Image: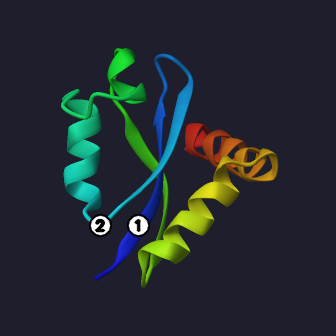
């Protein structure tokens, strides 16, 4: 089973969310239809996938998720957002 670490972005509110899951398609749909009653459901506008990584086990995915949530990881993600918005 593969695990995904993903970053989604809400352009309307300029917000990012970093998470991990086994089913990226379902999780993205949950974020957008507000059935995932957490951080992302508080903001209007759609969430779009801007970055993902695949891991062979959950422990590796959790480690990477924590790295992306760190200061250096957020700088990396902000650069991805800038690149994404230019396209």
Q: Position of residue 3 (x, y in %)?
A: 38, 72
Q: Nearer the viewer, residue 29 or 2?
A: 2
Relative side of 68 to 6, left or right = right
Q: Position of residue 71 (x, y in %)?
A: 80, 45
Relative side of 78 to 59, left or right = right
Q: Which mark is residue 74?
A: none
The count of marks equals 2
Image height check: is 35 above or below 68? above
Which residue carries the number 1 mark? 4
Disc 1 or 2, which lies upstream in sequence? 1
Q: Residues within 10 Å of mark 1 (few under 14, many from 20)?
A: many
Image height check: is 32 above or below 20? above
Q: Position of residue 63 (x, y in %)?
A: 61, 67
Q: Position of residue 6 (x, y in %)?
A: 46, 55
Pointer 1 and pointer 2: residues touching (CB < 8 Å)? Answer: yes
Residue drawn at x 32%, y 23% is 41
Residue drawn at x 29%, y 59% is 24
Res. 10 image quadrant:
top left
- Separation of residues labelled 1 and 2 (CA atoms): 6 Å
Secondary element at image label 2? loop
Looking at the rendered image, the quarter that the N terminus falls into is bottom left
Looking at the rendered image, the quarter that the C terminus falls into is top right
Relative side of 46 to 29, left or right = right
Which residue carries the number 2 mark? 22
Image height check: is 39 above or below 54? above
Secondary element at image label 1? strand
Q: Residues within 10 Å of mark 2 (few under 14, many from 20)?
A: some
């Amino acid at each position: 089973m593969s695990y995904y670490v993903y970053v989604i972005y809400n352009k309307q509110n300029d917000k990012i969310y970093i998470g991990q899951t086994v089913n990226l398609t379902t999780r993205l749909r949950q974020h957008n239809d507000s059935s995932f009653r957490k951080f992302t459901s508080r903001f209007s506008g759609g969430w779009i996938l801007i970055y993902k990584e695949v891991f062979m086990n959950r422990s590796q995915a959790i480690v990477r998720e924590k790295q992306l949530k760190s200061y250096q990881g957020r700088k990396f993600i902000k650069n991805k957002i800038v690149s994404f918005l230019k396209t």
